[in-house]
Amino acid sequence: MCPALRIGVPRVPIVQTYAAAALIAIAYMSVATPIVDTASTREIPAPRPERSVTCDSPDAYRRDVDAAIRALQDRYVYLHDKHVDWERVMLVARREAATTRSKRDYVGVLEALLDNLYDSHATLKANTAHSPRLVPSGLDLWAEWRGATAVVTAVRPGFSADQAGIRPGMIVTMVNGVPIGQAAAARLGPAVRRPAPADALAWGLLSALAGRHDVPRRLRVRDASGYEDDVALDLAQHRRVDDAGPEPLVESRRIITAGTTSTISLMFGSIRLNALGDLASVPAFDSALAKLRDTRGLILDLRNTPGGGSTDVAEPILGRLRAMIPGMRESSVVAGLGTTRRRSSCSSADGPEAWARAWQSASMACIAPS
C-alpha cells in the first residue's frame, strides 16, 4: 500500500465570512489506496491496481497528480474565482510528474500545482526541507504592496526579523538578491494569468518573504531616511519561526480601547485560534468565550490557521458565533479585511488592539489571513 499525501483546501463555505474556519483535508492517494472523503467519512473505492504498479515511479506519480487535479476540480470551492489557466495547470503538473524520480521531487510538483491557486488555505499536508514556509504562520514579518512598493506593516516579536532589526515602515527592495517584485511574481504558479490580480500579488509577496525552510533569507531594506541595508535573517543566534514551540489551542485576552473626547473606553475580548483540526479546540473555545462574556465585543483572530482543519471543529465554533454571546447584537456582527458591510483601515497584519479601535460600534470582528 502506498503512503498518502494530503492537501487541505476550503471546500464548502459554511459561512463565507469565516471561510478560514470552514476547511477540510482531502486525501490524495495513489491508485493502490482507497480515497477517503474526510468531510463525510465515505470511502470511495479506487480502481484495482495492476500488479506491476509501484509507488515510486513516474507512472505512479502521474496517476497521483491526475487524482489530485480531479479532486481539486470537484472539491475546491474557489476554483472558478481564480485568475488561472486551468488547462495549463494540468499540462505543467502532468509533464513534471512524468519526469519525477523521487518522493521529494513529487512533493515539489504538488506544491507547484497549489501555487497556481495563491491561497493560504490550500496547502500540502507533507513537506520537505526545501518546502516553502506556510503563510501566514511561517512569517515573522508582514508586508503589503503600496503601489509597486513593498512596505513592512508588522513584525513578529522575538523572531528572526525582529532580532535582525526589521521594523514596520521599512521598505523591502530585494530578497536574496532578487528585486522584490520579481521574487513575489516567481512564487506564483506559471498558469496564473498576467497581469496577476491584487490578491495573487499579495500572496506572492508574503510567500517570498517567508522563504523556504532550508534557505537563509537576506533582505535589502530601506528606512524612512532613505538608507538601504542588507539584513541577514535566520542566523544561528536567531529564533526562527521553524523553531517555534507548540502553541495553546486557543488564546484569549482582554483589550481596553482608550477613549477620546467623543468616545468612551471600551473593553473587547480577543480569541486566537491555533488548531482548527484538534477537537479539543471546541471546549477551549467555549472556556475562552465564558471568560470574555462581559466584554463589549469579540475579536476572532484566525491568522494562525493556514493548515486547514476539520468540520467537526469548525461547525461547533461557527455555531457559537451564530448564537452569539448573550447581550450582543447579532445585527452588528462584522468581519475583518473589509470583506463585508464596512471597510476598515486595518489589515490582517494589524493586531487585535487596532481592530478594537476600528470596530468600537460592532460586536464582533474577524481577523483572517488574506
Image: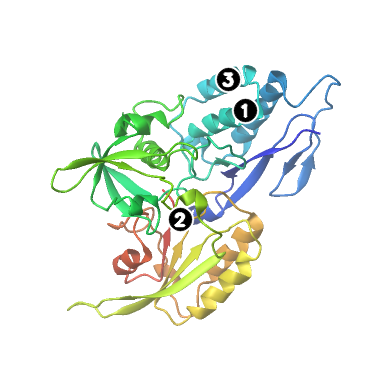
Residue 146 image offset from top left, x and y in percent = 24, 43
Q: Earlier in the sequence, mark 3 or mark 1?
A: 3
Q: Nearer the viewer, residue 34 or 18?
A: 34
- Which residue lies most toward the bottom here? 294
Determine whether 342 is above or below 2 in the image. below
Q: Secondary structure at mark 1?
A: helix
Image position, residue 193 (x, y; %): 40, 26
Cα distance in 3D space between marks 2 and 1? 29 Å
Which residue position is annotated with label 2?
A: 303
Res 15 visible: no
Closest to the camera, between mark 2 and mark 1, is 1
Residue identified by numbered label 1: 106
Question: To which residue does mark 3 refer?
Answer: 96
Q: Earlier in the sequence, mark 2 or mark 1?
A: 1
Name which quarter of the figure residue 59 lies in. Answer: top right
Task: Estimate how packed mark 3 is, as few (under 14), some (14 to 19) or many (20 or more) residues with alpha carbons within 10 Å.
Answer: many
Residue type indicated by callout 1: Tyr
Left or right: 299 with respect to 344? right
Query: Which residue is at 43% across, 28% downward?
Result: 192
Q: Residues within 10 Å of mark 2 (few under 14, many from 20)?
A: many
Instruction: Please name the amino acid that badge 2 sits on.
Output: Arg
- Seen from the viewer's position, the closer of residues 276 and 248 is 248
- Quadrant the N terminus occupies: top right
Q: Indicate the secondary structure of the residue bearing disc 3.
A: helix
Amino acid type of the residue that numbered disc 3 sits on in the rendered structure? Glu
- For marks 3 and 1, give the CA distance: 9 Å
Q: Toward which corner of the image does residue 357 lie, by quadrant?
A: bottom left
Measure the C-alpha gap from mark 3 to mark 2.
33 Å
